[in-house]
Image (spheres, coloured by chain):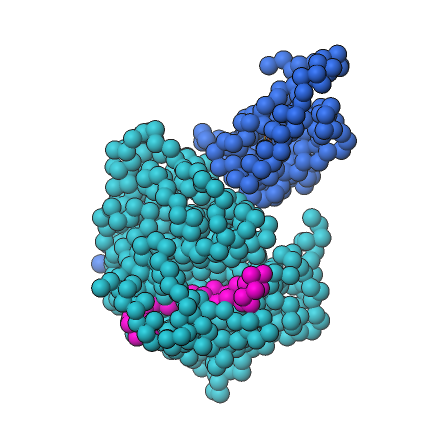
Chain colours: A blue, B cyan
Amino acid sequence: MWLWNKIKQLAISFRAGMVTLHYPFEPRPAPEGFRGQPVWDHTKCIGCAGCASHCPARTIFLRDICQELRILLYDSSRCTYCGRCADLCPEKAITMSDKFELATDNRQDITQSLELFMMTCQRCGRCYDLEIKNYIDRLSSLGYRYDSLEARKVIRRSTADFSPEELEKTVTYERPGRLEK
Amino acid sequence: MSRKEELVRWLEKELDGNFISAEATIPGRLFIDLKREALSAAATGLMNRGARYQVGVGYDARKSGQGFGLVHTFAFDKDSLLVALRTFAPEDDPEFDSLTPLIPGAGWSEREYQDLLGLRFRNHPNPRRLVLSDDWPEGIYPLRREVPHDLMPPAAEEVAFRLEEAPPGTSIVPLGPFHASLHEPAHFSVYVDGEDIKGCEYRGFMTHRGIEKLAQTELTYNDVPFVAERICGICGSVHSVNYAQAVEAAAGLRIPRRAEFIRMVALELERLHSHLLWLGVAGHLIGFDTVFMQAWRIREKIMWLAERLTGNRKTYGMVIIGGVRRDINQDRSEDIRAVLKEVEREMLALEKAILKDRTIHKRTRGVGYLSREEAVKWNLIGPVARARGVDMDARRDHPYAAYDEVQFEVPLADSGDVWGTLVVRVKEVYEAIKIINQCLDKLEKLPKNEPLSVDLEGPIPAGRQGLSLVEAPRGEAVHYVLTGEENRPERWRVRAPTYPNLQAVPSMLLNNKLADFPIIVGSIDPCISCTDRVLVVERRSGKARLLSGQELENLSRGKRSKK
Ligand code: SF4
Ligand code: SF4
């Protein structure tokens, strides 16, 4: 009985053979749909901070360094690769890449920072992207935090107050060129 | 008359003026408010009626002027009913009657709130520190509202860990905090007489991560599932599903059917790989490494499958409040079926080759024996209880998701030892495969374009209670949520399955050989990371002959300062 069991075990082990991969000498590509390190597309991001306020690890930071310049900093060292940011971005500026070999001795290797040009609202003095306006509306995508609807209302109100006369005056203002899409 | 009505009527009559209110939020739940004088009378009554104690939840209710709240939850498995008794004590006199003399399994919960909230328990038989380290300053109670979540008081010098004296005629063998047979930090000081174990003292809670406090102060409802998933290194979905269910119950949200089945697939996949992992570890602990290698080889197929389905091997990230994030479409469902078929075939072959092997029998039969009565007394759960003939399974007794629509068996054993837990777990592997296949059948029949999640219609009102169970691979996990303001839970309590099971380990060890220590502790599949999730990260000052407090401190502080 004992011997018979051992023979069976041997057979199983032999049939399986060696299953260990020759990784890292041979690459092991990640499957489709893998949630690796998120990557930002600079040209698409509108600086709405949707990703930052939904990141469970709180590892995306947005700061206004002056009236027109907003910095988005993503620090991968605390990222949990949940993909929440990519889900919520209204502009689809974030993709979950297949990068998973992220061990490094230099933190800069795994951070990403974007400098976003935000135009100042001529009326209220706050940053608002007039070039591609109304994108804020798209924020009510799936799972968007309910309490942020309040914030949306505030922005709506300020645009509604923008009188046609005021708007006409701004036509002569210089604006940055449109992004080619 | 249903059990629910009977209980309410009896409590009203028995407790008279001490009964405040009863609320039945969803079927199978009963939330009762009492005056604190009546707590032990009510608990005694419930236990006499066949209830099983689950967990205590303490919370800081001073903001609403109610002092401190304490909730004890009980399960009636036969009636699919969970009962929560809530009492309050004023801030200047936070004392409750201890339930521990009546229910030994309540001991840890009460000691936890003594440490974390500064509650006091009258007549607690062993009111020592449990959760906080020995050099934590007196009078700082981390779960209180005014204590910030990242508080780190300076460590005291030369504070020795207070262990109990060994009983006369025995000597102490310290095992842990880091020991080859323990995969996570825990300390057992084992009293031995020669080779025989005569007793043991457990000291754990060394790696607190403060997850509950974090959720109550920093995160929002929809952030928590992704953090909850990281409570455990094996059964992440258990906690995220459980949390989401508790919030959904509190908010009165019904998730789409498709999402229910997808959650079940994720949960059962976890059970599969968890049991295979355990089988491997158990083989390794008794020195039978063929089992270890082969079980883990089979397990790897499931890990890769999960990676294809969800985007990650272990942290599935599938669950949000109101549903799931990814679909299981036709292609994926065929992929699952193919992998499961192979796993089942390989598992059968492995089972045939090892279950009759003398090595396993010699090392597991009669080892770590605990009688059925003891198991009930200690409120053991999961495979550890089922190996002692206790017929319980939250999936069948308190069906959640769509478990009432699938057929499965609840395997039992009556040997009461480590062998029993092995048999139960191996059988559960096949049951899990059966459940997944049924879920896939149902998914294929459901309309394809159904949304995967539903949205909330408004903010979740504050002050609602939600209680949820999920049968994790190691036993039932309990989540209690009290909704709060600011879009986050006021209180979120996680009771992982290892919490009650670990409390009974000293009884299991009694009169066994020291050499069997690893497999006995291993037989409950202890998940220290689940159990130790409660509060502020702290090191423990070790005994001088283990590793001095200062050394530990230097290690942990060193790591921190590099950040
Ligand atoms: S993947 Fe998750 S944790 Fe990482 S940045 Fe995005 S939201 Fe944050
Ligand atoms: S959510 Fe998208 S658009 Fe908004 S800040 Fe983040 S990356 Fe930019």
Residue B71 in the image: x percent, y percent? 45, 66
Which residue is at a point 46% across and 36% down the rendered structure image? B311
Residues A165 and B312: in front is A165
Q: Quadrant of the N terminus of chain B?
A: bottom left
Residue B427 in view: yes
Residue B504 in the image: x percent, y percent? 40, 71
Residues B287 and B484: in front is B484
Please say whether residue B48 is one of the residues in the magenta stretch.
yes
Dividing the image into four quarters, tell me where ligand 2 lies.
top right
Which residue is at a point 45% across and 72% down the rendered structure image? B35
Residue A146 higher or lower than B141, as above or below: above
- Tag count in the figure? 0
Which residue is at a point 60% across and 14% down the rendered structure image? A181
Query: Which stretch did the figure color magenta?
Result: B45-72
Residue A26 in view: no
Residue A125 higher or lower than B295, as above or below: above
**From the viewer's perspective, is B516 left or right of A10?**
right
In this view, the residue farthest toward the right is A66
**From the viewer's perspective, is B345 left or right of B72?**
left
Query: Quadrant of the rendered structure where residue B116 is?
Result: bottom right
